[in-house]
Image: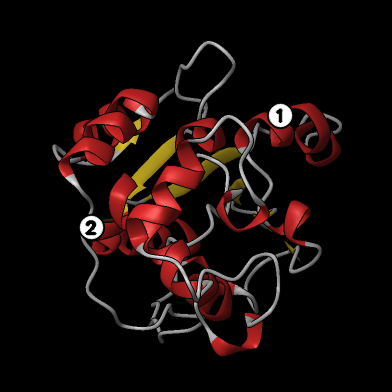
Amino acid sequence: MMIFFKERLAFLAVPKTGTSALENALGPKASVIFRDPPGIKHTNARSFEAKYRQLFERGNLPPLETMAVMREPVEWLGSWYRYRQRPALNGHPNSTASLSFDDFVAAYLADAQPAFANVGQQSRFVTDQSGDLLINHLFSYHDLAAAIRFLEDRLDRQISLKSINQSPKQEISLSPTLSAELRKTCALDFEIYQALQDGPLSIA
């Protein structure tokens, strides 16, 4: 999470959406940047509204606007799966080294998720408890150019991204049965991402 106090903007970092690269590029400009622990670094919209908004809006200051980036749901899970296959996690409960992508998604869909599959859900990151969008400016991972244009305009600076914290390259595929189950269980994720195909989503 990064706060740009003067520009009245809070960047909420959805995991596995290129946020590390943006953090690296924008960190020097941010008034406040939370790098650790992960639970604060990746503060979701509900937690921001409940815990942090009032901290940055004391007095007669204009309200902060929030922004975030969202990734295609299967691709997002694939990034988690690949990231947790790295050798550094060998022998750790979070490792997916011995699992297929189908195994990972099946575990993700289970009522009791094992540690390696406990990665959250993008829709819960960007919506309120009713499932309504809670982010002022939401961008697609596949249209990061739009997010960068928005940030360049808002922060009045040019932005150059470098790849950081990338998951290992690996082709993945998901069985039709699990794909259908995932689309049913994570219907809101797919609905929001589909809406992003027409451009960034905004709320007043």
Vertical placement of residue 60 versus 39, above or below: above
Residue of label 1: 49
Relative to the observer, which residue lies in front, 51 or 77?
Answer: 77
Q: Is residue 58 visible in the rendered structure shown here?
A: yes
Please say which color scheme the image uses: secondary structure
> Tag 2: residue type?
Asp
Q: Quadrant of residue 88?
A: bottom right
Q: Secondary structure at mark 1?
A: helix
Q: Position of residue 160 (x, y in %)?
A: 38, 83
Q: Position of residue 43 (x, y in %)?
A: 69, 46
Q: Quadrant of residue 29?
A: bottom right
Q: Relative to 181, is 68 on the left or the right? A: right
The residue at 21%/36% (across/down) is 177
Spatial CA distance of label 1 from label 2 is 26 Å
Relative to the observer, which residue lies in front, 158 or 35?
Answer: 35
Q: Relative to 80, is 73 on the left or the right? A: left
The residue at 40%/77% (across/down) is 159
The residue at 57%/43% (across/down) is 120
The residue at 20%/34% (across/down) is 194
Q: Quadrant of the N terminus?
A: bottom right
Q: Quadrant of the C terminus?
A: top left
Relative to the observer, which residue lies in front, 196 or 84?
Answer: 84
Q: Is residue 147 visible in the rendered structure shown here?
A: no
Residue of label 2: 143
